[in-house]
Amino acid sequence: MNVTSTRTTLQVDDYLDLLNLAVKVGDLKWQKEIKSRLQYILCLPTR
């Protein structure tokens, strides 16, 4: 695993943790923002 994929994996894991927190506190706007960011990250082309 190279550095770029490691950073991306950490970001995705971090965003998933934040999403779980947003669900627990019931913040729908925050959930939507996190989901948008995750979608953006996962659609980036790999190098």
Image (cartoon, grey):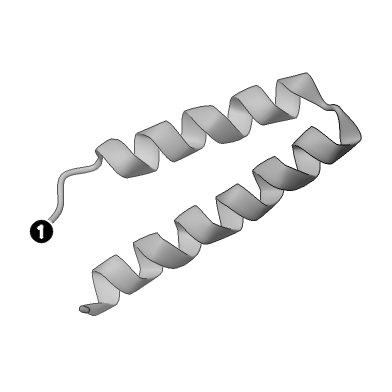
Q: Is residue 31 left or right of residue 42?
A: right
SS under mark 1: loop
Q: Quadrant of the N terminus?
A: bottom left
Asked whether 12 or 4 is in front, the reply is: 12
Q: Position of residue 16 (x, y in %)?
A: 59, 49
29 vs 23: above or below: above
Outermost residue on the left side: it is 47
Residue 34 occupies quadrant: top right
Specify few, some or many for label 1: CA neighbours under 10 Å numbering under 14, 14-19, or 20 or more: few
Q: Is residue 47 left or right of residue 39?
A: left
Q: Quadrant of the C terminus?
A: bottom left
Residue type at the position of mark 1:
Arg
Q: Position of residue 41 (x, y in %)?
A: 37, 43
- Which residue lies at the image location 49% right of the left edge and 28% below the top edge? 36
Which residue in the structure is indicated by mark 1?
47
Residue 3 occupies quadrant: bottom left
